[in-house]
Amino acid sequence: MNSGSVLVVYSGWLGDLVWIFPAIRALGSAFESVSLVVSKTQAPLAEVLKNGVVDHLYVDDSSRRLATAKQVRQDARARGTRTFIDLKGRGKTGLYIPWGRGNTVMIPHKSDAREYVFARLLHPLAASLPARSTGHMVDAYLSGLSGLGIENVPVSFDLPFDDATVAAGEAIVEREGLRERKSIALNIGSAQFSKIWPAENYRRLAEILEQDLDCKVVIMGSRDFSPNGDYDMQQSQEIFSTTPFTNLIEETSLPVDAYLLSSGGFNVVVGNDSFAGHMAGSASQVGAGTEGAVQADNGRWYKGNPTVSLFGPTNPLYCRPYDPTDSFNTVVMPETYPDACVYDHVAHTCPHYGDRYCVDRAHCMAELKVEQVVAAIEQKLPGGR
């Protein structure tokens, strides 16, 4: 183990946070102390990491960034922190890294950084992390730690939920009888509108699952989520308020959702390219022969939950639930894209990623058919064809 501590800056979307769980655990095994800076959006989930994974947590809130950055730098100096890693490569978050001789500062390769020039101006002597490979984001982040001598570490997405969160989650499991019949979780939202499958399609899917496949359907999402204008709550009230399905959107907290999604309470979890699918379907490395585990081509054994991920404007190669076995997760994409759609299928980029343009026009996710999703879920259900 290295002496001293490490500070990691990773301010982004909620789903992104899931991708760095294995890297944070790896750093925790190599350093005596780990500090983490996350975005305001990520903070409710990151709080769970304070139960033994992360020693100090800070929130990158734009309204008080300079004051928080000053505090982070002061705390880092007081702890004698010498290693600093900016995993996201956003110039403004470089403010959290102190300047000083003898520090090891690592920022993403210029091909991966969001604001490379600004990041380099703030820390001109920083070392560049290896350029990300064409594989999954989890592998890319783990490979970036090779410069610190951290390699071939076990991959784990297990979160250290406290007793209250586990109790709240298990109370819902028991109340709803989730383990007593085929149960399906539908996660209807995402931070980016271009990635959202229309709520009307989710309702039609839920009707088919309950009426034709005899499944228990649970609607999940965030009670309040400012990046998408509280979309989940809005659709909960407009589309699902009078349905017979169990609706947890107005009831649960983010940590409880994370517990329900990752603990195996559902037979299948369905959702957009977002936190929920990442949390439910990403497979952790386990011992050989563990019940339900599958061996990957790399010789390691992994276990995850069955998930169906709905993708349109983003690349599943990088962003699907992490599954080296290719057995726990199924990606479903539109068979055709609108003529007016400007999604680049080569570079996997969309100029409307995150804005509201795709809600009403040229929305590729609307081309993804309910029948496609039903077929994928049937394959994942016990006794599926």
Image: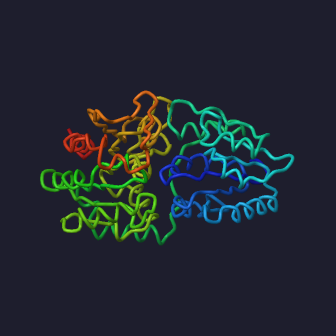
Q: Residue furthest top?
A: 346
Q: Residue furthest left?
A: 212
Classify 199 as above or below 309.
Answer: below
Give the image's coloring scheme.
Answer: rainbow
Where residue 323 appears, x then y in whole percent? Answer: 44, 39
Classify 227 as above or below 143.
Answer: below
- Which is nearer the eye, 233 or 293? 233
Q: Quadrant of residue 259?
A: bottom left
- Which is nearer the eye, 142 or 314? 314
Tell me what residue is drawn at x 26 percent, y 56 percent.
183
Where residue 265 appears, x then y in whole percent? Answer: 34, 58
Viewport quadrant of the C terminus: top left
Q: How many marks?
A: 0
**In this image, 122 relative to 160: left or right?**
right
Q: Residue furthest right?
A: 101
Tell me what residue is drawn at x 50 percent, y 43 percent.
285
Tell me what residue is drawn at x 39 percent, y 68 percent.
252
Classify 138 as above or below 68.
Answer: above
Where residue 1 appears, x then y in whole percent? Answer: 74, 47
Where residue 270 appears, x then y in whole percent? Answer: 32, 50
**In this image, 36 relative to 291: left or right?**
right
- Which is nearer the eye, 350 or 11? 350
